[in-house]
Image: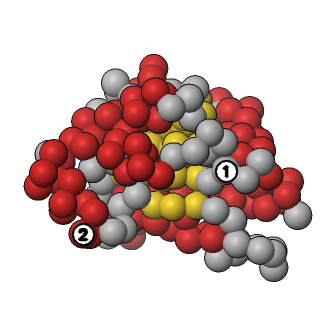
Amino acid sequence: MADKVTQIIKESISVKEQILKTMVKDINKVADYIAGSLKAGGKILLFGNGGSAADAQHIAAELVGRFKLERRGLASIALTTNTSTLTSIGNDYGYEEIFSRQIEALACKDDIAIGISTSGNASNVITGILEAKKRNLTTVALTGFGGGQLAPLVDIALIVPSRNTARIQEAHITIGHVLCEIAEEKLF
């Protein structure tokens, strides 16, 4: 079992080393967009399913609370947290509309929509991004598996170079932490 533990950790490190080689400029660009949005009075709207929903909540919490710096709260909403909203939209309009309907209701011009889907093929995340595009929001995707159908729809796709869901999710939260830290430093 020690060999298995070593293999898993080395695989995770390898994915992050590939991110260092290919994604640093795009991650920094997304951090710039986030800082610019927040400075202009916008907010960050994050959404995804399952583990990606948890990542959306985690990143939103780091922005609203704090990441490293003692500072004011930063406007960020995980569209995955209000069970009454999710279940009423799912029941009345279908599960595919749970994020797009919230973006329709909550989005303003300086907001950023960040859709998280390890496969890049979650239909409700795609529908949410399409609604954000209709409203001229800056759109970002956190994906893996080559980006799926989601990557070509967004302004910036951060595509983790892996086909392993666990490694992709580990990288997504690392990227989320990097975005929070850089945005904080740019603003404060």
**Disc assigned to residue 72:** none
Label 1 amino acid? Gly
Label 2 amino acid? Ser
| Residue shown at the point (40%, 43%) measured from the top left | 104
Q: Which residue is mark 2?
A: 84
| Residue shown at the point (40%, 58%) measured from the top left | 79
Q: Using the image, determine if residue 155 lies above or below residue 46.
A: above
Q: If the image is split into quadrants, where does the C terminus sit?
A: bottom right
Q: Is residue 38 left or right of residue 55?
A: right
Q: Using the image, determine if residue 17 lies above or below residue 44.
A: above
Q: If the image is split into quadrants, where does the N terminus sit?
A: bottom left
Q: Is residue 99 left or right of residue 169?
A: left
Residue 141, image x, y percentages? 49, 37
**Disc assigned to residue 42:** 1
| Residue shown at the point (63%, 71%) measured from the top left | 64
Element under label 2?
A: helix
| Residue shown at the point (70%, 72%) measured from the top left | 73
Colour mapping used in the image: secondary structure
Q: Using the image, determine if residue 46 lies above or below residue 54.
A: above
Q: Using the image, determine if residue 148 lies above or below residue 183.
A: above
N-terminal of the pair, mark 2 or mark 1, is: 1
From this viewpoint, which residue is outermost toward the top?
A: 152
Residue 11, image x, y percentages? 46, 49
Q: Is residue 13 visible?
A: no
* Foreground residue among 65 and 50: 65
Q: Quadrant of residue 115?
A: top left
Q: Quadrant of residue 28?
A: top right
Element under label 1?
A: loop
* Foreground residue among 7 and 130: 130
